[in-house]
């Protein structure tokens, strides 16, 4: 028989409990106000991922450079949001399916597993739910979102619902992610790349300068990694190419 979750009584009369999976795979359960965010970000997805023939959503694992480990996703839309989080230099932790919430919403007992938890450099926590655009106005979905937002507010967390971003930005970040791992690149050439970039304003310009200093197979991966890392801040609202403009980060 499933164990009934312990519920925390809150100031508005509702009740909430949080169940999450620790790094050793064991489930833990605490009151909402006692949850240690670091234990969640260090842990595993709270639910198991299943793969089977005919599954409508594509699940998998993505190696996030931000946290230097694999992060699970349950759909390609969710993967896109994880890519943006990995590219966001304000994000320091990414956890997928971070916990299972149980609490009352009026007379109804709700249960929900958000898609992502993001921790930021300033200590802010953002809980994210990813849904296809076609489902964003479903009354059942909007009611679930509203309840989750109230739960997050009790802990001082931000709450985000996401159904997609600027297509050009998402695709550019997806491409740049191929150059996210410094251990696969010539990182000793970063100072050379930055020195060349300070006299240029476009990707093609800095590549032309570097072509006279570095092997051809080193130049483009180096420049793209500098954009991924934030050392070069590029305009990603248009397809990435030689004409893409950038500024050197201060």
Image: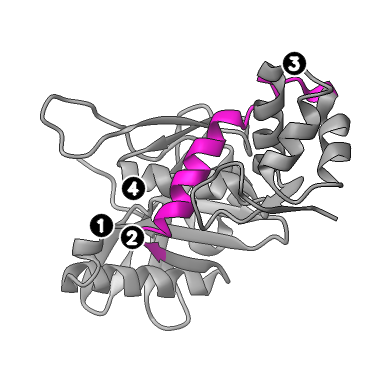
State the separation of the CA atoms marked 4 and 3: 37 Å
Secondary element at tag 1: loop
**Residue 66 at least partly seen:** yes
Sequence order check, earlier mark of 2 and 4: 4
* Disc 2 and disc 4 in contact, CB within 8 angstroms: yes
> How many neighbours does mark 4 have within 10 angstroms: few (below 14), some (14-19), or many (20 or more)?
some
Q: Position of residue 151 (x, y in %)?
A: 43, 70
**Which residue is disc 2 drawn over?**
163
Sequence order check, earlier mark of 2 and 1: 1
* Disc 4 and disc 3 in contact, CB within 8 angstroms: no
Sequence order check, earlier mark of 2 and 3: 2
Q: Which label number is shown at residue 77?
A: 4
State the separation of the CA atoms marked 2 and 4: 7 Å
**Which residue is disc 3 drawn over?**
215
Q: Position of residue 202 (x, y in %)?
A: 70, 48
Secondary element at tag 4: helix
Residue found 71% across the figure and 25% down from its top: 219
> How many neighbours does mark 1 have within 10 angstroms: few (below 14), some (14-19), or many (20 or more)?
few
**Residue 29 at least partly seen:** no
**Which residue is disc 1 drawn over?**
132
Q: Nearer the viewer, residue 143 or 65?
A: 65
């Amino acid at each position: 028989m499933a164990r009934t979750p312990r519920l925390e009584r809150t100031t508005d009369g509702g009740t909430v409990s949080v169940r999450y999976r620790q790094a050793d795979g064991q489930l833990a359960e605490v009151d909402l106000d006692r949850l240690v965010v670091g234990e969640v970000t260090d842990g595993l997805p709270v639910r198991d991922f299943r793969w089977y023939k005919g599954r409508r959503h594509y699940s998998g694992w993505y190696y996030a450079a931000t946290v230097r480990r694999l992060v699970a996703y349950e759909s390609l839309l969710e993967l896109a949001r994880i890519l943006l989080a990995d590219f966001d230099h304000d994000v320091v932790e990414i956890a997928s399916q971070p916990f299972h919430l149980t609490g009352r919403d009026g007379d109804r007992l709700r249960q929900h597993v958000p898609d992502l938890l993001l921790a930021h450099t300033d200590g802010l926590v953002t809980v994210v739910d990813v849904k296809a655009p076609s489902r964003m106005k479903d009354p059942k979905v909007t009611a679930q979102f509203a309840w989750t937002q109230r739960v997050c507010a009790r802990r001082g967390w931000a709450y985000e619902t996401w159904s997609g971003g600027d297509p050009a930005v998402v695709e550019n970040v997806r491409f740049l992610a191929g150059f996210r791992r410094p251990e696969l690149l010539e990182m000793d050439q970063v100072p050379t790349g930055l020195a060349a970039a300070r006299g240029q304003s476009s990707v093609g310009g800095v590549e032309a300068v570097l072509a006279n200093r570095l092997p051809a197979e080193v130049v483009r991966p180096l420049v793209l990694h500098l954009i991924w890392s934030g050392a070069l801040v590029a305009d990603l609202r248009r397809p990435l190419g030689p004409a893409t403009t950038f500024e050197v980060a201060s």
